[in-house]
Image (cartoon, rainbow, N blue to C red):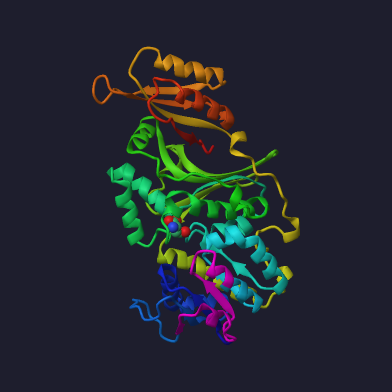
């Protein structure tokens, strides 16, 4: 049987990895797919730049439209990123009746509803395993492996760069910016690294995971998003003293009254497996009603781990080329006409436990004022730490762990604590999850 011709958009870190993996494992891949899969046409911003990959047999162009309009190309792999030119190219590929494989989480999270509707009309597939958690097959797992479950919640370390930074800060006391530079050098970070450290990349991925887990439309704009830039070495140390690790998590929970969608730094008990996932590794815990808690772990970024997911999608697409569109696995796991518009809960209605770090004058009555405010807001304290001042007479850090409370009550308590004269800085608030 003739091989399937693939057009590749983007020859960066993941594009290069995809070329390499497809060539190196060509015979294993053909045995699985039933026919060969070859890249015949590729577009790159700079076609003359020196690359360490073998591009033999691949026609190179600087024009992505030449690839998506190439009548020989049957499947387009989009690895450009962003949601401007990538969106136009993917729309054109679908219009041309070509299947699409993409690693582009921003594109799927923000425009997936539109793209899937068009793909369905045109009878083509859009596969996006590589968009979430790099090499971990979490999309396939949620969409197929856990299809018998009602998913109750999921929580994941889904940004490798952020996890790399937090891990290095904790284990080696390294500086935030220094570690970020290394992540960029290693090809983990996004083109705009604020997407990693401000939580936007994780929010893109959580949007996709939640849609597939709960059968809801993609709703990126409703994800509460907080990054890791405010985390200090002090917070990491105090969390450890209390028996916790700080991890940047994407969390989605299904309640009767609605769905929680939130990305933020989170204290997790250090005994949890996911609390010990370090470096660029990702991990996702999924709780299904039948299976119970499950944990998926692997490299969340990098050339070949992400290429592993891209190539798996190519194999899936090639296997399904001869199936009728209505017999394929739906893009968002649930049939398109069976998605439900469950409400997304605003943060003030989310209930969780909290870590608070206060900077206070070292004098009588400060702690009494703070605990009075918390008790008036109905907030129960689980633990308190007061650190010695660095210099006698200077301000002290007070660390509190609370019981569960609605975020709106915590917001009111924090506003009142910050208004106290004895509190000399903004209160640092981090959410705590036991994931049990
Ligand atoms: N910048 C992303 C990360 C790449 O660090 O996880 C993989 O999506």
Q: Is residue 94 above or below residue 284?
A: below
- Residue 78 is covered by the magenta coloring: yes
Counting from the top left corner in percent of width and height, residue 12 is at 41, 70
Vertical side of 60 occupied by 247: above or below: above
Horizontally, is 276 left or right of 37 in the view?
left
Residue with the most extreme right position: 337
Q: Considering the image in quadrants, where does the N terminus appear? A: bottom right
Q: Quadrant of the C terminus?
A: top right
Can the viewer see residue 299? no
Give the residue at the far left of this rendering: 391
Determine the residue located farthest toward the top in the rendered image. 364
Q: Residue at x 47, y 39 (%)?
A: 266
Q: Nearer the viewer, residue 346 or 182?
A: 346
What's the residue at 49%, 69% (across, down)?
79
Left or right of 2 on screen, residue 381 = left
Does residue 405 appear anywhere in the picture?
yes
Q: Is 388 rendered above or below residue 42?
A: above
Q: Position of residue 117 (x, y in %)?
A: 69, 65
Q: Quadrant of ligand 1?
A: bottom left
Residue 155, x across and y down, in percent: 53, 45
> Which residues, given as a range, are shown in magenta?
59-88
How many labels sit on residues? 0
Residue 82 is one of the magenta-drawn residues: yes
Position of residue 67 measured from the top left corner of the image (x, y, whole percent): 53, 81
Front-most of residues 193 and 122:
193
Residue 222 to residue 309: above or below: above
């Amino acid at each position: 049987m003739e091989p399937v011709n693939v057009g590749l958009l983007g020859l960066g870190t993941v594009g290069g990895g995809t070329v390499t993996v497809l060539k190196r494992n060509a015979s294993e891949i053909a045995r699985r797919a039933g026919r060969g899969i070859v890249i015949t046409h590729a577009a790159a911003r700079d076609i003359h730049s020196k690359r360490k990959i073998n591009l033999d047999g691949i026609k190179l162009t600087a024009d992505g439209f030449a690839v998506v309009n190439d009548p020989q190309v049957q499947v387009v792999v989009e690895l450009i990123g962003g949601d401007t030119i990538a969106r136009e190219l993917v729309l054109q590929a679908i219009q041309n009746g070509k299947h699409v494989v993409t690693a582009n989480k921003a594109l799927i999270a923000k425009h997936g509803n539109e793209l899937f509707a068009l793909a369905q009309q045109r009878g083509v597939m859009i596969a996006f395993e590589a968009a979430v958690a790099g090499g971990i097959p979490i999309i396939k797992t949620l969409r197929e492996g856990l299809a018998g479950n009602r998913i109750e919640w999921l929580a994941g370390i889904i940004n490798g760069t952020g996890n790399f930074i937090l891990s290095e800060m904790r284990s080696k006391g390294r500086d935030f910016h220094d570690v970020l530079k290394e992540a960029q050098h290693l090809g983990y970070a996004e083109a705009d690294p604020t997407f990693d450290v401000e939580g936007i990349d994780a929010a893109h991925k959580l949007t996709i995971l939640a849609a597939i887990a709960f059968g809801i439309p993609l709703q990126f704009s409703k994800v509460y998003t907080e990054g890791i830039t405010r985390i200090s070495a002090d917070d990491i140390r105090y969390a450890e003293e209390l028996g916790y690790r700080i991890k940047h998590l994407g969390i989605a929970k299904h309640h009767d009254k609605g769905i929680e969608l939130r990305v933020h730094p989170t204290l997790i008990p250090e005994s949890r497996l996911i609390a010990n996932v370090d470096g660029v590794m990702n991990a996702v815990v999924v709780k299904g009603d039948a299976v119970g808690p499950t944990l998926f772990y692997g490299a969340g970024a990098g050339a070949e781990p992400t290429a592993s997911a891209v190539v798996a999608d190519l194999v899936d697409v090639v296997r399904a080329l001869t199936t009728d569109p209505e017999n394929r696995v739906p893009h968002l796991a649930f049939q398109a006409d069976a998605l439900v518009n469950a409400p997304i809960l605003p943060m003030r209605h989310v209930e969780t436990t909290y870590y608070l770090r206060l900077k206070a004058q070292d004098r009588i009555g400060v702690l009494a004022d703070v605990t009075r405010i918390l008790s008036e807001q109905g907030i129960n304290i689980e633990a308190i730490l007061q650190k010695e001042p660095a210099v006698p007479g200077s301000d002290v850090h007070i660390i509190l762990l609370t019981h569960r409370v609605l975020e709106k009550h915590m917001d009111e308590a924090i506003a009142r604590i910050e208004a106290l004269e004895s509190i000399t800085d903004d209160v640092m608030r981090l959410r705590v999850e036991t994931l049990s």
